[in-house]
Image (cartoon, rainbow, N blue to C red):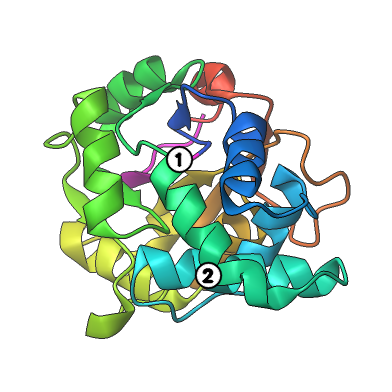
Amino acid sequence: MAAYDAIYFDLDSTLCEPIQGRSQLLETAFERAGVDQFCTVAGLRAASNEVTDAETDQVFFERTFEEAAERADADPTVAPDLASAYLETIDPAAVRFRSGAEAALDLAEERGPVGLITNGTEEMQSQKLEALGISEFFDVTVFVDPRNGVPPKPHSKPFEMALSGIGVEPSGTIHVGDNVYTDVAGANAMGMDSAWINLGHETAPEHEPTHELASLEEFETIV
């Protein structure tokens, strides 16, 4: 087993998941906006990877729905209404730990410093951390904040901030997340180890993780 100087986690779909299913959230948002549904959760997830400079949650979802609409040959002008409907539907605090997440956090804490690097704004993500009871758990927490020069993963800036916040070198660390594009690619580019939680969204990942897990229940096998 590897001995890491610090362990970093992603938040959404890694440590937590919404209590209401994502498919239902998306379906409800389309219904509220009065728009025929043109994408799935996986499609929205893929579209979100293209949004790198949104300064607010509203703008992020507007650009995400616009990208998803263009990919589906749908009308991109419905994006603002869909973004508003989605934000009205989702309750950031209505989340629960994913299977194995609590035990993984406890084990990580035993091994040394623990950090969080999340592709979400502090306004939205802090509500999730509070609901889970882990708002004060991490030694360093990095949120996306383009207005202050913090773009989303896989950009190097969030990882650099997380590493400097604990004072460790990339080669002695690992980042755990569910997204190959943001988590694995970002960590690999920094020289960190990467652990990919394979939720079935990507069958042939473009970036090779150091470790592949079916869930965080397997976390102890890599640390």
- Name the main secondary structure of what is drawn in magenta: loop
Q: Secondary structure at mark 1?
A: helix
Image: 201 above or below 104: below
> Could you tell me residue 99's position as x and y percent?
51, 16
Asked if one can make out residue 223 in the rendered structure from this viewpoint, the answer is yes
Which range is magenta? 1-12
> As displayed, is residue 198 above or below residue 209?
above
Q: Which residue is mark 1?
A: 89
Q: Residues within 10 Å of mark 1 (few under 14, many from 20)?
A: some
Residue 187 visible here: no
Q: Residue at x 57, y 59 (%)?
A: 82
Residue 162 falls left or right of residue 41: left
Return the x and y of residue 221 as percentages of the image width and height.
56, 22
**Which element type, helix, strand or loop, lies under badge 2?**
helix
- The answer to whether the residue labelled 2 contacts the one labelled 1, judged by CB atoms less than 8 Å apart, is no
Callout 2 environment at 10 Å: few (<14), some (14 to 19), or many (20+)? some
Residue at point 61% right, 56% down?
184
Can you identify the residue that label 2 sits on?
80
Q: Is residue 133 left or right of residue 12?
A: left
Could you tell me residue 5's position as x and y percent?
31, 46
Residue 148 horizontal side relative to residue 55, left or right: left
- The amino acid beneath tag 2 is Pro
Q: Earlier in the sequence, mark 2 or mark 1?
A: 2
